[in-house]
Amino acid sequence: MRNLLAITDFSVKEIDELISVALDIEKHPKKYQEKCKHKKLATLFFEPSTRTRLSFESAMLSLGGSVLGFSDANSSSSSKGESLSDTIRVVSCYSDIIAMRHPKEGAPLVASKVSSVPIINAGDGGHNHPTQTLTDLLTIKKEKGRLDNFTIGFCGDLKFGRTVHSLIQALSRYTGIKIVLISPEELKLPDYVKKDVLEKNNMEYVETESLEKAMPELDILYMTRVQQERFFNEQDYLRLRDSYILDVEKLKNAKKDLNILHPLPRVNEISVEVDQDSRACYFKQVENGRLIRMALILKMLEDK
Ligand code: CP
């Protein structure tokens, strides 16, 4: 039985296959509409979500399956003190596959030890978010036609940004990728990601605080939100939250074929006027997320 806890749980070949299936689903949705008939997906969200939970649910419904679960831990018995392990043991009796989000890093790993059905990590604290990475890879593949030989800038909260950590892990397995890390000093990429991923894989990377200086060389700009929920100190959040605001002016120095990605939700970091720019891809990512999650559910149920 397979789990998806980190993006490296799947090989590059398997990711290529998922992307191919997602593209086929986009072209021939009817072919897939009964593939998961009588199968049930449980979505257990101990942390808020719009895209990940609803795209998983939409994906399963589009495959002819059913969904159950909760979107607020306070409505589950974890609010009465039930352990995560007990919750998972119970829900794995009711479902064929579980997608879960939890504020604690490593919670999906704990779940996978006791679950009798596959576990998908839908985000664990500031650690990993592998299904967002699949979404990002599908988007890059569709926009650029390739997953190698480009310069990508990650901008904003690189410390707590689990989508950044997962995407860097994924990109470490492709060739010709240059990474530009754009953040304030306090929100720099954690040392463990630099050492265990970037340096271990001899990836080319630079760090800077200036989005303006980095902009002209970027093929992809991956913007992120400064995440209020990860800060212990409100003052630090207020000081750092508007470190970067992408607007039309800043894009004047960007490449014509730049792709602007953002996992969403956004707060202030991308001005709404940028939405009209043909280089903005963040709402395309949303639809790609549903397609790749359909492919993922199919794969994991087949592997099971
Ligand atoms: N990208 C993402 O994880 O969005 P949600 O928090 O809305 O699920």
Image: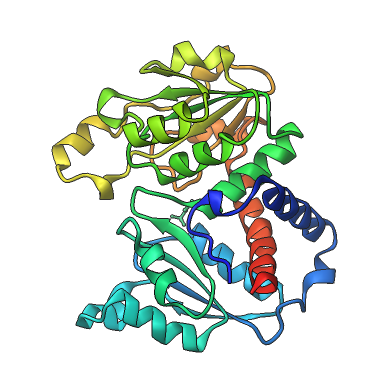
Residue 286 spot, x, y in % from top left: 60, 51
x then y, percent, for residue 82: 25, 81
Q: Judge from the rendering whether residue 188 lies leftward or rightward of residue 101; answer left or right.
A: left
Choose top left, top right, bottom left or bottom right for residue 25.
bottom right
- Image height check: is 29 above or below 214? below
Q: Is residue 57 visible?
A: yes
Figure quadrant of residue 18: bottom right
223 sits left or right of 261 in the view: left
Is residue 243 depicted above or below 34 in this figure?
A: above
Residue ID at (67%, 45%): 12
Residue under the image location 38 percent in, 26 percent down: 244
Q: Determine whether 257 is above or below 120 in the image.
A: above
**Residue nearer the viewer, 84 or 24:** 84
Quarter containing the N terminus: bottom right
Residue 178 location (% of width, % of height)? 56, 22
**Residue at left offset 50%, top offset 88%:** 94
Q: Residue furthest front?
A: 200
Q: Quick check: can you spot residue 249?
A: no
| Label tally | 0
Name the residue located 64 percent from the left edge and 30 percent from the top edge. 279
Which of 154 and 244 lies nearest the eye of the viewer?
A: 154
